[in-house]
Amino acid sequence: MGSVVQALFNRVTAGGKWTDERKLVLKLDVSLMIFSILGLTLRYVDQQNISTAFTSGMKEDLNMYGNQYNTVAACWSVGYVIGQIPGNILLNRVPPHRCVTACQLLPDASMIFCLEIGWTIMTLCTTWVKNWHQLCFIRFMVGLFESAYYPGLLFIIGSWYTKRELGKRSNFFQAATALGTLVAGVMQAGIYKTLNGVDGRAGWRWMFIIDAVISLPVAVAAYFFIPDLPFTTKRSWILSADDLALARSRLTDAGRLGPAAGGLSRKALKKVVLTWHIWLFTLVYSCYIFAQSELGRYLEQSAPLSPDPQQSMAYWLKDSTDPTYTVEQINYYPCGIWATQIVSALSFAFISDRFLGGRRWPPLILVALWHCMDCAVLAGLPVYQANRATRWVLYYLSGVVNCTPGLLYAWCSEILGHSSEKRGIVMGTFNAVSFAFNAWLPLLLFKQVEQPKVYKGNIAASVASAIQVVGLLSILYLSTRDAKRGSSVAESVPSDTASDKETGHASGGDEKIA
């Protein structure tokens, strides 16, 4: 099969314009990117189905009239946090394609496969829940099984692409979170209309059965298509030995290194804690996750239960008395937020890579400032004023902020490219800490009983976005300072060691962990 695929690929890429590097990037796009995007889209369909199910009959069926919805969201976050850092560390020691596809595959010798089968089983079991207490347990387990999926795939993507390629790929991947959420709303509305009551089963319960059926073939394909890390993977039916040599060469030229001996030693871990990267990236990402928790899910990465503009909009439509909206309309109308996110993610990624020379901070600061204003205005507007057009626009444009994760992960990969282990730990930490805080903060500031106004939550989200801007400016200053220091050190060392120094400092000037 491998020889047939290679022959077909060579036929398609015949011609002088197809350099070896372009062929390599195309292979990565066809394998790593396509199946990462498909897998993440289905994951978000699974996740978002909880929030769409809530407004499609789950609330009434499970008697969730108080703050039970928030409690269920917190259970998912707790499971997600617990698995974050161990999952990202494993990516440097266990073949990543086993980590990220295990949720939907039968387990192999590696216990990592148990994660994906657990995710699929728990999602399927949601269709049989009898009360919200059972739903809490299921969501905790789903969060635990899903914990390494989103940051793990971004880690792999950041390990293969160069700076001029990474922004677009990271945000194409990020756009899948919006696509999955958008598809979930459309699917839930269609299923509610066509399957509600069939075989005595509510429409929202059918959705979880359908999820399990469509997830399996994509996961099986992903197991064969998604490569491991470039410095540890072996020749495969997709990537030849020449492809791997070229990939490693161009990453080394860009200052990217693979897993190193002693990279997870006590001394190395101490260096991680004592540098600014882990603290500032954690601050920025935590502020982002909280500020957009007003957006319907925690985006990472992303709890589908988080009360946010998308979820607040669903409440806004559901509680409206003049006019009133059907269940299908309540599911369809908030999808505009995710359409906005897709456009935002792709546009800012293209601008960052093509016109800003790979600089990530301008769009990151711009969208954070916009979200700060958006949440502040939502807090001040009457919920059901005579002219509701302004609130519709603000809800839809709140999706702009969700281009942040793809660009922030890309920036982190570039600054910490010299150490695969440090990059994995920092990414896992800022993802885990952000969800640790957001496991309980929405319980205080985005209470279900205060929807859709959530005045305190919107004000807090606006403040968090302002703090996020300060954190981004701090990262910009410190990374620029470290890069200049790295250049100065490289110029002052003997010529026979200068290239080694440049490699160690090319992406941020931090000392290599080894």
Image (cartoon, rainbow, N blue to C red):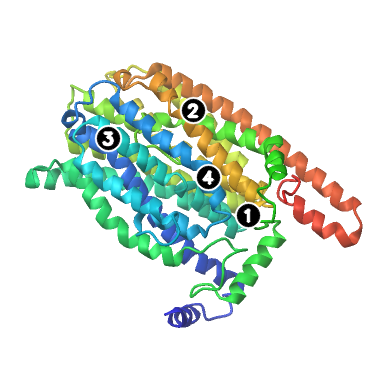
Provide residue 270's location: percent of width, then percent of height: 70, 39
Q: Mark 2 vs mark 1: which is more N-terminal? A: 1
Q: Badge 2: how crowded within 10 Å, few (<14), some, or many (20+)?
A: some
Q: Which of marks 3 and 1 is in front?
A: 3
Give how far apart the Cα atoms at labels 2 and 4 are.
18 Å
Depth check: give the residue in front, 485 or 73: 73
Depth check: give the residue in front, 427 or 135: 135
- The residue where tag 4 is placed is 86
Assess whether mark 1 and mark 4 are in contact (beta carbons under 8 angstroms): no
- Callout 2: helix, strand or loop? helix
Q: Badge 1: how crowded within 10 Å, few (<14), some, or many (20+)?
A: some
Q: Looking at the rendered structure, which numbered label has been put on residue 135? A: 3
Q: Mark 2 vs mark 3: which is more N-terminal? A: 3
Provide residue 149's location: percent of width, then percent of height: 45, 49
Q: Looking at the rendered structure, which numbered label has been put on residue 437? A: 2
Depth check: give the residue in front, 64 or 19: 64
Give how far apart the Cα atoms at labels 2 and 1 are.
31 Å
Give how far apart the Cα atoms at labels 4 and 3 are.
25 Å
Depth check: give the residue in front, 271 or 390: 271
Give how far apart the Cα atoms at labels 3 and 1 are.
42 Å
- Callout 4: helix, strand or loop? helix
Assess whether mark 3 and mark 4 are in contact (beta carbons under 8 angstroms): no
As drawn, the residue found furthest toward the front would be: 109
- The residue where tag 1 is placed is 163
**In the drawing, does residue 452 fall left or right of residue 84?**
left
Residue 301 higher or lower than 170, as above or below: above
